[in-house]
DNA sequence: GCGGACATCTAGACGATGTCAAGATGCGCT
DNA sequence: AGCGCATCTTGACATCGTCTAGATGTCCGC
């Protein structure tokens, strides 16, 4: 599968990451990405169809990295129980956003990508299922207070997503003293998990 | 202050709102905004300097609308205590995002506007102060559990911001049964406020 | 081993965009 | 009346995304 370039799709995705890091999503141009990859300005279209297609593929890869980051956090921290696993998911989510800000930024910019792309939808489903199944396990273990699973899932997702988005926007760091986003994530998710627990110490 | 057009700056801001509603932030073009306002393509630059300047002014107006929405929610729901007021702030935040999606979308897209604009910063400060002062009042009244005010403020902001962002992205509605974002906001903020309260029923 | 089919990439063109410079137009003040 | 200035228009330029045609390299059937 290595013709002229070698692996142009992968090189283009890497170029997108650098381009987003340099100038944000709005600073990404298809021609600049092509230049970074060392090909002509028309080359990306052949593999990804359009700019939206390229960004969609980049966002899809982001969901894979998200799942990887979340599962790694769970594996490393070895939580003792389901609520601990829920907190680990939250830390892994924020950790992904901090570690892959370019991907995170593109993933939720549905106006610049193809939201109906099957691979994109499938990747996001996989990531979301990690959250719901953990919450369901907490509920099955009787560790959740009597709340709708949906409300808990939405709250958890909103909490870590908002934290990550606000942190990356730079709006958060200027207002608070805690400057380590991972510590912040641990504190925030800890507060949340404690709140939805059935028993409180 | 009414020369050729009447009040072109206001007309341009209204045109931005419609343009964002039609095609998202990435679909906004300065020339299209000018066309919507019935002026030539160079007219906006005279009032706002650049596209980023126009969007920054639009985002600044968004912060004013946010403060208005939040204060209206507090005034209408007449919360009995400080925690109730905190919940009202959250509902008002989400209500603003639902009612003014174009503004909300632009406000946190720092890559397409001028994040250092003094008026923009001042407007965001004002809105954030509404949150911190309420939390401080909760703490002063002894109604907060022993948590850092910062963690509570960041959690609260992250929660409602994430909820609003995810809802507007459309990724939320397809996964849950509750289809009224304001009911969802009430449930989520209720859960949160209950969690940070000192006493629990 | 070779020739055609195909994937891959280049090169040029087109309309649209953001920004700039220069000029036209209308308001208010002296 | 006439000057100054804010307001707006017009034209130009580089750049962008996308389309088309063509060049170049690779693989499979014979």
Image: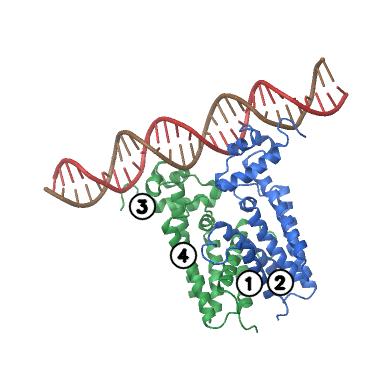
Chain colours: A green, B blue, C red, D brown
Mark 4 and mark 2: span between their CA atoms? 35 Å
Q: Which residue is mark 3?
A: A7
Residue at 65% across, 36% down: B45
Q: Which residue is mark 4?
A: A125
> What crowding class fits label 4: few (fewer than 14 Cα within 10 Å), some (14-19), or many (20 or more)?
some
**To which chain does the residue with label 2 belong?**
B
Q: Are marks 2 and 3 on the same chain?
A: no
Marks 1 and 2, how far apart in space? Answer: 10 Å
Mark 1 in CB contact with mark 2 (< 8 angstroms): yes
What distance separates the C-alpha of mark 3 from that of mark 4? Answer: 28 Å
Q: Which mark is residue A187?
A: 1
The chain holding disc 3 is A
- Under circle 1, the secondary element is helix
User: Residue at image x 43%, y 62%?
Assistant: A122
| Residues flagged by tags 1 and 2 on a common chain | no
Could you tell me how far apart the alpha carbons at marks 4 and 1 are, in whole angstroms? Answer: 27 Å
């Amino acid at each position: 599968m290595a013709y002229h370039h070698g692996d142009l799709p992968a090189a283009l995705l890497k170029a997108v990451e650098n381009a987003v890091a340099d100038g944000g999503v709005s600073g990404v141009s298809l021609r600049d990405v092509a230049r970074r990859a060392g090909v002509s300005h028309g080359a990306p279209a052949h593999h990804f169809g359009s700019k939206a297609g390229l960004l969609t593929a980049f966002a899809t890869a982001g969901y894979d990295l998200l799942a990887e980051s979340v599962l790694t956090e769970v594996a490393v921290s070895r939580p003792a129980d389901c609520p601990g696993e829920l907190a680990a998911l939250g830390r892994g989510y924020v950790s992904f956003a901090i570690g892959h800000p370019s991907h995170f930024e593109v993933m939720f910019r549905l106006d610049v990508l193809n939201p109906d792309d099957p691979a994109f939808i499938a990747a996001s489903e996989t990531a979301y299922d990690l959250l719901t199944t953990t919450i369901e396990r907490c509920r099955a273990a009787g560790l959740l207070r009597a709340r709708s699973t949906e409300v808990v899932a939405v709250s958890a997702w909103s909490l870590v997503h908002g934290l990550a988005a606000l942190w990356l926007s730079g709006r958060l760091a200027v207002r608070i003293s805690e400057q380590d986003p991972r510590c912040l994530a641990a504190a925030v998710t800890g507060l949340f998990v404690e709140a939805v627990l059935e028993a409180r110490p």
